[in-house]
Image (cartoon, grey):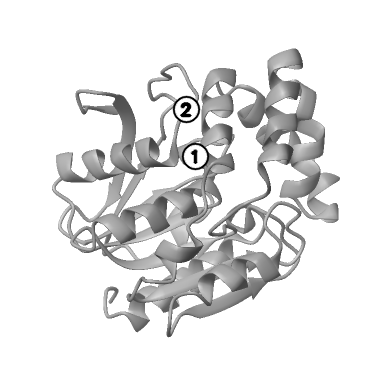
Amino acid sequence: MHYADLGHIKLHYRIDGDPSGQPVVFANSLGTDLRLWDPILPLLPKSLRIIRFDKRGHGLSECPAGPYSMGSLVRDTEALLDYLGVKDCIFVGLSIGGMIAQGLAVKRLDIVRALVLSNTAAKIGQPSMWDERIAAVKAGGIDALADSTLERWFSKKFQSSSDLQLWRNMLVRQPAAGYLGCSAAISGTDFFTSTSGLRLPALGIAGAEDGSTPPDMVRETTDLIPGSQFHLIRKAGHLPCVEQPAEYAQVLTDFFRSVGQCE
């Protein structure tokens, strides 16, 4: 295990693949840790330097008192990549990870040369919706909304599989303070104006059965970036890298090759 002491926060991270390869950074969703990407890693080109991390309040990273701002999550990520000496990476962000991706790209184009915005948007939900979820977690812990969350996350078919329990366990074992802090960060974020100013290669990925960030929402955000691509994955919800790992990995690989960053 590796920890980066960034001064203001300690983050858990992992690096796989070729140490001298093209850096690809993965940022996961609310309520998951860096293991979210495990299903696709064996399917990606071996020439990549794959960097994953647990954002603040999740996984094995520190969990400071909330609420958090999106700016703090972006600064954490910026500091981690500076710590690792990362430049010109392809940044793959899912859900809140995609919001971090947008914020980092606006701030540091020297770090981010291409974006994958997976199951995310420039703005996700309304503050009133997040207020309700925050109140539910404060009253009953993450368990209080676990079932409804999994219904939004996964397709009907996956919800009846034995694997669902694994993802429920990951969700409810995240620190409640971290979940609350990141929920507040999402609630306060609207990147429509800043993301529309981005000029870099971008790919949007949506799951046809995503109840958290429906395909039209993902496409709307992706379309803010001129020349962007969009791919819809069927028979998948909010975490298509889990439900359809082979297709997800192939879409990523094709995009990496299209921007000249994958052999």
State the mark number for residue 59: 2
Callouts 2 and 1 close, C-beta under 8 Å: yes
Place residue 84 in its image quadrant: top left
State the mark number for residue 245: none
Give above or below for 194 relative to 27.
Answer: below
Residue 1 appears anywhere in the view: no
For numbered disc 1, what is the local secondary structure? Answer: helix
Return the x and y of residue 129 as percentages of the image width and height. Answer: 73, 40
Question: Which residue appears at 45% of the width and 69% of the height?
Answer: 252
Return the x and y of residue 80 as percentages of the image width and height. Answer: 24, 39
Where's the N terminus, which quadrant?
top left
- Amino acid tagged 1: Arg
Name the mark nearer the viewer: 2 or 1: 2
- Whether residue 12 sits left or right of residue 129 in the image: it is left
Question: Which residue appears at 54% of the width and 19% of the height?
Answer: 177
Q: 163 or 178: which is nearer to us?
A: 178
